[in-house]
Amino acid sequence: MYKAVIIGCGRIGAQYDFDSGKKVISSHAGAYDANPKTELVAVCDLDIEKAKATQKKWDVPQIYTDYSAMLAEEKPDIISVCTWEDSHAKIIKDCVKFNPKAILCEKPIAADKNAAEEIINACKENGMLLQINYMRRFSPLYQEIAEFIRSGKLGKIQKIAAHYGNGLVTNGSHLIDLAHYFLEEEFDTIHSIKCELKSAYPNDPNFAVLAESKSGVIFSLLPQDNSKYLILEMKIFGEKGCIYLKNSGFEVEFFEPTAHSMFTGYFELRKVEPPFSQKEEGRFLEDSVRELLIAIENNKTPLCSGEDALKTLKFILKCQN
């Protein structure tokens, strides 16, 4: 049994699972509670009421307002860092002093490149596994899609078209990370426009982005006002068809070229049964904890390492500057 603790009992740390309308586990606390190999032994938050609410919901043995005191007393195997990104570097550099097996850090990895590199180096120097929670990477369906693309079954990728709302960092970064994951390459040409479309987070505005990868794949990332309706979706267009991730990534559709219904000698995309064995249930946080344990037990690099997250941070910074 792995002893887990959480620093930060806000939305992703715990409070998303206070929503009775949620159909799946959506917080670190819920994911640790659900996994038979982990025990949530303590949580910490500067707001003691948030810590108390988390303790009550999951029957957590101990609560703290000082994370250093928690780490010294509990000696955890796994630490979840669920605070704002500008605090990650200090917290993680403090965490490694207590020799956990792994750190699961919320995205983005940090607020700037230097802080991100400090985090990566601190974990490497102390032999700590570091996993950044771009959680869609950990889905069995998304891993199957990645293998499908990399094996050439979709043909040469031509473009990726994605739509998001409520901030480039908060939501758009998930799609940037997926583009990196699916293509296994970065984008060296990035153009962006700051948009007036409403974001729920004043410090995280929306940007319209057009980028090109080293191999010539075009990536468009366009914002939406999520106060009207939620959207987080991606279409991957290859020579042999199109994969459509819709409904916040919970559903997948597949389209393949067939003879055009109106123009002889041409083809059009038509929806067919997706060629994937896995189904998406939206259990991204549970998937994240499961994959972290696989990395620990096999001493392997996590599916979303600090270096992976740094690529996405650099993309975001280019858009903002």
Image (spheres, grey):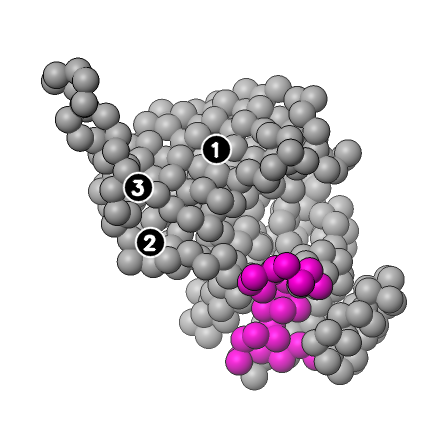
Of callouts 3 and 1, the N-terminal one? 1
Question: Where is mark 2, residue-wise?
Answer: 144
Residue drawn at the location 61% of the way across and 60% of the way down: 22
| Side of 276 where 26 appears, left or right | right
- Between circles 3 and 1, the one closer to the viewer is 3
x, y percent for residue 15: 72, 61
Secondary element type, mark 2: helix
Q: Amino acid at mark 2?
A: Glu
**Magenta stretch: includes residue 173:** no
Q: Amino acid at mark 3?
A: Phe
Secondary element type, mark 1: strand
Residue 129: quadrant of the picture: bottom right
Residue 197 is at least partly visible in this image: yes
Of callouts 1 and 2, the N-terminal one? 2
For residue 162, the mark is 1
* Residue range corresponding to the magenta coloring: 18-41
Question: Where is mark 3, residue-wise?
Answer: 254
Of callouts 2 and 3, the N-terminal one? 2
For this rendering, which residue is in front, 53 or 111? 53
In 3D space, how far apart are the residues under numbered discs 3 and 1 (Cα atoms)? 16 Å
Residue drawn at the location 44% of the way across and 30% of the way down: 161
Quadrant occupied by the N terminus: bottom right
In 3D space, how far apart are the residues under numbered discs 2 and 3 (Cα atoms)? 13 Å
In 3D space, how far apart are the residues under numbered discs 1 and 2 (Cα atoms)? 19 Å
Residue 72 is at least partly visible in this image: no
